């Protein structure tokens, strides 16, 4: 075997996003023991930074030592007990994974199905909560990465509260890119991922739990169906009274990277980061529309960080992506599930949300489309994007 030297790509898919040299070099610092007091001081700062990001005072806020899917499992396995009814909104791939998690935890999933590319319908959710007064939890995806749709998290949480339900919210793609206000909206359990709008390497899943959520965990009559993700055990490491005890070996260097990512977000300012995602999205959209391309999702519910663009009739979508990768070292995403072959998913997440990336993407896409019998003017697209940045 030989050392693996990856190519330098620009990552504009559904995650991971570009990771800066600054974060990569933080990761290369000397490994400390995970119970070293110096390391534990850094962990406390990570928890504080995550609280700021989630806009919460929740004491139990920490990164699960595994990717976003593990944060998802942490929420569902701890909060859903055998026989619990959970109303779950399904408007894409990740809503369906929530259903799968509920069932595996022994719960009963009541589905509110929404057509892919559309936002959760509040009236349908309310009807499901009314028809199922036994429901204990409402679960939904804030930013559906498979379709590029933003849910009205505040309104959905209000509905849940009016029906005495806790909320589990997937903020893997939304956190850091659009407002997420855990306490103000009354979210009880939330999970995210390090590799999307936080600009960090993949492999960590920030989570946070309200006191109400923890009360439900404490009141369980059966053990959590995972040893690794059992909050009552993990808490002793992340939140241990009088010193932390060993639970599992923390991914020390990955946590340096997350710490650095949080420093970078605090330097930029959270609101400035939200604005950057919005502006780069508006510029990209102007450029794409100048080439005659159409979005899957209506403008008022569109995610800035995940742009689902309809593949024009007769264009081979995989071949276009292959050209972008080969000729421009640029990665964009394919459609998932029923959207496979029908859309491209262009990410503007974290460090990837820059004017330079928008311009690269428009230039590359125009070149690729022209090679695929779809006439597109890269110059017109660039002019449209630049006029947004100049405004
Ligand atoms: C990426 C993503 C996940 C899963 O995160 P992983 O880090 O890939 O496990 C979950 N939910 C949404 C909305 C996502 O975009």
Image (cartoon, rainbow, N blue to C red):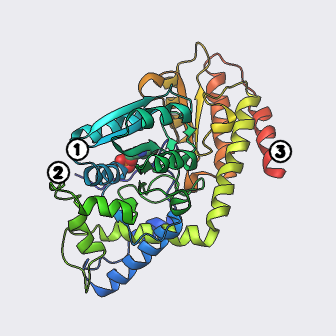
Q: Mark 2 points at which residue?
A: 225
Q: Name the residue under label 3.
A: 387
Answer yes or no: is residue 339 visible.
yes
**From mark 2 to mark 1, how far is it between C-alphas?**
7 Å
Q: Mark 1 vs mark 3: give the one in front.
A: 1
| Element carrying mark 1 | loop
Q: Determine crowd level at label 3: few under 14, some 14-19, many 20+ residues with C-alpha closer than 10 A.
A: few
Residue sitting at the far top: 314
Q: Where is residue 231 in the image (x, y as percent from the top left)?
A: 25, 63
Specify which label sits upstream in the sequence, 2 or 1: 1
Classify 283 as above or below 189: above
x 24%, y 63%: residue: 218
Please state which of residues 41 and 31 is positioned toward the viewer in this rendering: 41
Q: Where is residue 284 in the image (x, y as percent from the top left)?
A: 69, 40
Q: Determine crowd level at label 2: few under 14, some 14-19, many 20+ residues with C-alpha closer than 10 A.
A: some
**From mark 3 to mark 2, how far is it between C-alphas?**
54 Å
Q: Quadrant of ligand 1?
A: top left
x 15%, y 54%: residue: 222
Tag 1 and tag 3, C-beta contact below 8 Å: no
Q: Mark 1 points at which residue?
A: 105
Specify which label sits upstream in the sequence, 3 or 2: 2
x 40%, y 38%: residue: 88
Q: Determine crowd level at label 1: few under 14, some 14-19, many 20+ residues with C-alpha closer than 10 A.
A: many
Q: Is residue 230 left or right of residue 4?
A: left
**From mark 1 to mark 3, how far is it between C-alphas?**
51 Å
Q: Does the residue labelled 2 lie within 8 Å of ligand 1?
A: no
Tag 2 and tag 1, C-beta contact below 8 Å: yes
Please state which of residues 38 and 214 is positioned toward the viewer in this rendering: 214
Please state which of residues 7 and 390 is positioned toward the viewer in this rendering: 390
Q: Which mark is residue 223?
A: none
Q: Position of residue 30 (x, y in %)?
A: 33, 78
Specify which label sits upstream in the sequence, 1 or 3: 1
């Amino acid at each position: 075997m030989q050392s693996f030297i990856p190519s330098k790509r620009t990552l504009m898919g559904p995650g991971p996003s570009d990771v800066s040299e600054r974060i990569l070099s933080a990761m290369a610092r000397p490994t400390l023991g995970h119970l070293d007091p110096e390391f534990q001081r850094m962990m406390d700062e990570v928890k504080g930074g995550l609280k700021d990001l989630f806009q919460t005072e929740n004491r139990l806020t920490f990164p699960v030592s595994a990717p976003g899917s593990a944060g998802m499992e942490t929420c569902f396995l701890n909060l859903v007990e055998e026989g619990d009814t959970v109303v779950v909104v399904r408007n894409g791939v990740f809503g369906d994974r929530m259903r799968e998690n509920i069932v595996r935890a022994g719960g009963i999933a009541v589905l509110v199905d929404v057509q892919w590319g559309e936002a959760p319908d509040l009236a349908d959710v309310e009807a499901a909560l009314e028809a199922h007064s036994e429901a204990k939890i409402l679960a939904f995806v804030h930013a559906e990465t498979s379709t590029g749709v933003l849910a009205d998290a505040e309104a959905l949480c209000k509905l849940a509260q009016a029906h005495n339900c806790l909320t589990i919210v997937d903020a893997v793609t939304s956190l850091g890119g659009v407002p997420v206000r855990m306490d103000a909206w009354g979210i009880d359990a939330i999970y995210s991922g390090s590799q999307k709008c936080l600009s960090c390497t993949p492999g960590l899943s920030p989570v946070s739990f309200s006191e109400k959520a923890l009360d439900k965990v404490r009141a369980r009559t059966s053990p959590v169906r995972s040893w690794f993700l059992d909050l009552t055990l993990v808490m002793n490491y992340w939140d241990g009274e009088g010193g932390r005890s060993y639970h599992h070996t923390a991914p020390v260097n990955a946590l340096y990277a997350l710490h650095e990512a949080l420093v970078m977000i605090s330097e930029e300012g959270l609101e400035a980061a939200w604005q950057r995602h919005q502006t780069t999205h508006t510029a990209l959209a102007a450029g794409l529309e100048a080439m005659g391309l159409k979005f899957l999702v209506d403008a008022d519910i569109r995610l800035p960080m995940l742009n689902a663009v309809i593949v024009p009739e007769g264009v081979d979508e995989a071949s276009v992506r292959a050209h972008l990768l080969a000729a421009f070292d640029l990665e964009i995403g394919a459609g998932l599930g029923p959207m496979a072959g029908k859309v491209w998913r262009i990410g503007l997440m974290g460090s990837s949300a820059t004017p330079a990336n928008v311009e690269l993407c428009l230039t590359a896409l125009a070149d690729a489309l022209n090679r695929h019998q779809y006439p597109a003017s890269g110059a017109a697209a660039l002019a449209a994007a630049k006029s947004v940045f100049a405004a």
